[in-house]
Amino acid sequence: MTALTAAGVRVALGGVPVVRDVSFSVGDGEWLTVIGPNGAGKSTLLHAVAGLLPFTGDVRWHGDDPAGLHRRQRSRRVAVVPQHPVVPTGMSVFDYILLGRTPHLPFLGRESPADLSVVAAVCERLDLTGLAGRRLDTLSGGERQRVFLARALAQLSGAGRALLLLDEPTSALDIGHQQEVLELVDSLRRDGGLTVVSTMHELSVAGEYADRLLLLAAGEVVAAGPPAEVLTVPLLTRHYRANVMVVDTSAGPAVVPVRPGR
């Protein structure tokens, strides 16, 4: 089963083309990571397929046109974790995660015991139970990233087949917290049947966790496939304008910057 398909997607911001005729598909339970230099259109593409930006072309979620779904239906099937989520001042961890249940509530309704149970279970799974009463603005970067993921998972709970879209999930995190967050996402994908589409700057990390990579440059797909086929010296030199070497490791290709002339 195909979880997500995009065909001929184009996005213009302020009249300027940012994403140009992009097509790809993602299988159920797969992890696809979109990479590319700054300004390539990665985040714009992610937000377009999530239905958060106007676009031309065709996008399908498990064969359905999201434009034909009610907003609540869309929110139950696709969750987006942006680079810089809005964090309400003074809100507790538990209450923030509980916001993820909003698409499941009846009109003018309140959270049910079942909704509270979902949030409690998500907190336990992501090791947040001890932080549930803390204010979000008192947490470390790694802790906050887990909370953002928890809200998305609470939103998707009970949806069956679901899409989790992550925009730079490891930005501003140190290497330890990067591993913690990505291992968590991978375990949730394998255990919970999630399909993951992410954007990422860290090329070696992207190659280690993603099943396939999509390389964008100037809004166009210039390469797609397994990490070993995309993370190559010719492609990275051309599109990132960087001097690099690629080392094969047991975890996947590692991209190492090399000073010019060395």
Image (tube, rainbow, N blue to C red):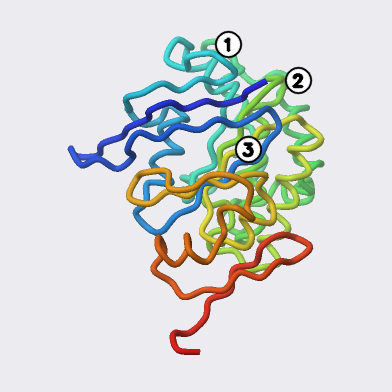
Q: Three-letter amino acid code at disc 1?
A: Pro
Q: Position of residue 44 (x, y in %)?
A: 38, 41
- Label 1: which residue? 106
- The part of the image, by quadrant, that contains residue 247 is bottom right
Q: Position of residue 155 (x, y in %)?
A: 63, 28
In front of the other: 164 or 31? 31
Which of disc 3 and disc 2 is earlier in sequence?
2
Residue 186 in the image, given as x and y percentages of width and height: 74, 45
Foreground residue, 107 or 70?
70
Disc 2 on helix, strand or loop? helix
Instruction: Please tell me which residue is depicted at 75% across the width and 28% down the height of the picture.
Output: 118
- The answer to whether 221 is drawn above or below residue 137 in the figure is above
Q: Is residue 98 left or right of residue 113?
A: left
Q: Nearer the viewer, residue 227 or 15?
A: 227
Query: Mark 1 and mark 3: span between their CA atoms?
Result: 28 Å
Contact between labelled residues 1 and 2, with CB atoms less than 8 Å apart: no
Q: Secondary structure at mark 1?
A: loop
Q: Residue under circle 3? A: 196
Q: Which residue: 32% across, 25% down?
A: 56
Residue extending furthest left? 15
Within-10-Å neighbours for mark 1: few <14, some 14–19, many 20+:
few
Look at label 3 and name its amino acid. Answer: Val
| Residue 167 appearing in the image | no
Of marks 2 and 1, which one's residue comes earlier in the chain? 1
Whichever of labels 1 and 3 marks the residue nearer the N terminus, that label is 1
Residue beneath disc 2: 114
What element does badge 3 sit on?
strand
C-alpha distance separating marks 2 and 1: 13 Å
